[in-house]
Structure formats: C-alpha cells, structure tokens
Amino acid sequence: MNEVLAWLTDGANWQGPDGIPVRTYEHLLYTFIALAAASLIAIPLGLWVGHTGRGRFLAVNLTGGLRAIPSLGLLFAAVMVLGGVVHGDAGIFVPAELVLTILAVPPILAGAYAGVEEVDAAARDAARGMGMTGTEVLWQVEVPCALPLISSGLRSAALQVVATATIAASVSLGGLGRFLIDGLGQLDYPQMAGGAVLVALLALIVDLSGAALQRVVVSPGLTGKTGPSFRFRPRRAPVRAT
Amino acid sequence: MQWILDHLDDIGYYAVQHAWLAGLPLILGLLIAIPLGWVARLNRGFYTPVVVGTGLLYTIPSLALFILMPLFVGTQILDPFNVVIAMTIYTVALLTRTVADGLAAVPESVVASASAMGLGRFRRLMTVELPLAVPVIAAGMRVAAVSNVSIVSVAALIGVPQLGSLFTDGFYRDFLDPIVAGIIACVLLALAFDIVIVLFARWLTPWRAA
C-alpha cells in the first residue's frame, strides 16, 4: 500500500510523454472520440426508432446481442484484421477506436429509443392536439422528456469506453492502461496498482461529471423535485462488458 | 476452423473455468444483494445511499479492480480468487438496485394481507415478497450474467485461465482462429446462462405460466 502511494506521489511519474498527465489526457481523448462518433450514429438512430416505432425489434436485439461479445476478443480481432490494412501507429489507433465506438453504440442507442418511447402518451397527444407537426413533437416534447434516459445511456457508454480503453493498452494503445499493462509485464506491482487507482478515479470522475451535466440539462419538471408530477421511475443501471 | 476441432478439449476446459468464474459470483452476489436491497427498502432515506453506493462500485474498470484486489484481500495477483471477488462486487452493484426495485413492485395490498395473516417480517419477505419479486430479479440476473461472462474474459490479461486465454493466446501468436473460437464460446456461454436463469425463474413462479 505504501509503495503504491510512493509511486503515485513520485514526481518523476508526473512528467514527460509517458507521465500521468499525458496518459490521462490520452485516455480522455480516446473516450471523447469514441463517445462523439457513437453519439453521431446512435442518437439520431435511437430517436428515429423511438419516434416512429420502426426497427424496434432490430434495435433491441442489436443492443442486447452486442453486449454478449467479449470486448477483449473484439479488440484483438479488430487489431489483427485491420492492422494489416492500416499501417504504423494508426494500425493500433484506428481499430482500437473503432471497437470503442462499436461498444459505445448499444447503450446510447438503447437510452435514446427507450427515452423517446417512454414519453408520457398524454404529453405527446397534447402536443399533437396543439397542432405540432411530427418534427416539432420530436424536438420540443419527446427529446426534452427523453433527456434523462439519453443521458444515462451516454454515461453507461462512457463507463464502457473508459474501461475498454484501459484494456486497449494490451494492444499497445496509450492512455492510463499503459501503467497497468506495463506494470504487469515488468512485475512492478506499485506501478500497476497506482495505474489502477488512477483509472478507477478517472471512471468515477467521468461518471460524476455526467451526473452533474445531467442535472443541468434535464428540465426541472422531470426530476420530481418540483410540483405534483413526481413519478417514481428507477434510473437504468449502467451495464458494462469490460 | 480445423484449429477449433483440434482443440475442443482446451476450449472445453476454458469454458468450465469461465462458467465457474462468472457463475459463482452471480450466486454469491445475489445472496448479498437480497439483504442489501431489503435494507434499501426499509426506509425512504436508505434507498439512495445504498443503491448509489453499490452502483459506484460498478464504475471501477474491471482490469483495475482485478489488480487492486490483492491490496484489499491480501491475495496474490494471479489468484483466481481475485476474479471471483471482483465479479461478486459487480454482481452486488447491479443486483442491489434490482432487488430493491423488485421488492418495491410488490403490491401494497399483498404485503398488508401477509402481515394481517400474522406473518412476521422475515417470513413475509421469504414467502411472499421475494417470490413475487422473482421476475424483476431474474431480469436483473440476466443482465448481470451477460455482463459477467464478458468481463471475466478480461482476466486473461492477469493470467487467470478461462475463455479469454484464447484471446491472448491468439493475439500473441498472431493467429485469428483461437480468438474467433473464444468469442463464439463466450457468446454461447452467455446464452446458456440466460436460458438457465429464464427456466429457473419460470420454475419458481408457476402461477405466471397460466
């Protein structure tokens, strides 16, 4: 325990291109890119599925089925297959980022379609009755009401990506996972445990920032803290595969 | 494909190890989550701290948790016991919320009738509330089972043998067949867990079949 603390507080580990700040930055960058790419695919798709009810069967099974595929196997297979096509450093970065994106899609997609689907039918009908068009109903009623679930889908995806980016160090990607994998390789327990503490903290901070952001963007009318509209709706627990 | 047929023995051995490492924590986790979920329901003020507290454990990435285990339990880094404890922690994190929500879904009138019949808290929980919460708990178990089977394969990186060993094996030898075999075996194992849970839940709730 003391050695782990010593590793964490050693100034030398906080400097240079393989220091803790650079590795943290890399980890956050991989996470951000994967989340952004996955959101671009999954949010429009999820909103469309939720709004029209079309493709629901496919979306449900896709999100459930992808979860059963072990991320480590997917990662190794992607690097081996694509590594022959993309050369150099990109031969690791591109397949790894692709896998991170693929793993982030199901939770975001599920959050988006379930969020829109579970909007109170009365609210939707009222909006229609006021003369709103389908698009107006989607953007002014369904999306705002779906924000809590969309946001919990994004948080779930963020946890999945942070965890998978950690194991991606085993295919020589950067990020905080380097300390865990290099520590294992060098039988340097303080380094791997120190890295593990940092990864756990990063995941916690990412999740709590997501929770804080959710409080800001979600309309107070939906949180149950105001007025009589309180309805007990259990928040979806995140599910991870890594 | 020939490789898979030639190594069915190895794959079978890894699959059995994998089933233990993913399945045992599922049962241990449920046994811990039931009292925790019950406590979360005792009082309105308990729900958030218990459910959020256990939920936060789930944010810890698996490789980090496997590596940190020796610090807390005093085991060796390669000990499979680390994986069992870590997976139990994840199962508790997922199921505590499920148990609490499942108990919350039992109709008030049923609970009141049970009390009126003279059932004490413990007997009411065991004979009325838990059986009625089985469908919700089983749904949570299915999610936890799939998640466990996937996460256990990460333990190959710390050298604990199970289906994930096929991934590291194949990767270090630059050979795709073991990786494909491992992925297929993991998906099949997850499916098998899923079927067992569904059948067991159906057996526990015969009144739902009607």
Image (cartoon, rainbow, N blue to C red):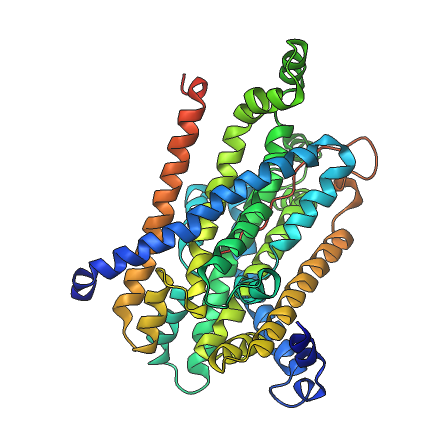
The foreground one among B33 and A148 is B33
Viewer-side residue, B73 vs A226: B73
Residue A115 visible, this angle: yes
Compared with B149, A10 (above or below) is below
Left or right: residue A10 versus residue B133 is: right
Along the horizontal axis of the image, is B45 left or right of B123?
Answer: right
Q: Could you tell me residue A82's position as x and y percent? A: 36, 76
Give the percent coordinates (x, y) of residue B176.
Answer: 28, 71
Q: Which residue is rendered at x = 72% and y = 53% of the image?
A: A214
Residue A147 seen in the current view: no
All told, the count of numbered labels is: 0
Rendered position, B158 above or below A54: below
Farthest-out residue, right: A227
Question: In the image as oriented, which residue stretches furthest toward the front?
Answer: B74
x and y, in percent, of residue A89 in the image: 46, 85
Furthest toward the top, the residue is: B117
Which percent across, then down, holds residue B169? Answer: 32, 71
The vertical placement of B189 against B194, above or below, is below
Q: Report the residue at 62% width, 36% height from top.
A: B35
**Could you tell me which residue is drawn at 62 percent across and 16 percent down?**
B110
Front residue of A192 and B95? A192
Residue located at (39% from left, 75% from top): A79
Q: Is residue B72 left or right of residue B154?
A: right
Q: Quadrant of the N terminus of chain A?
A: bottom right
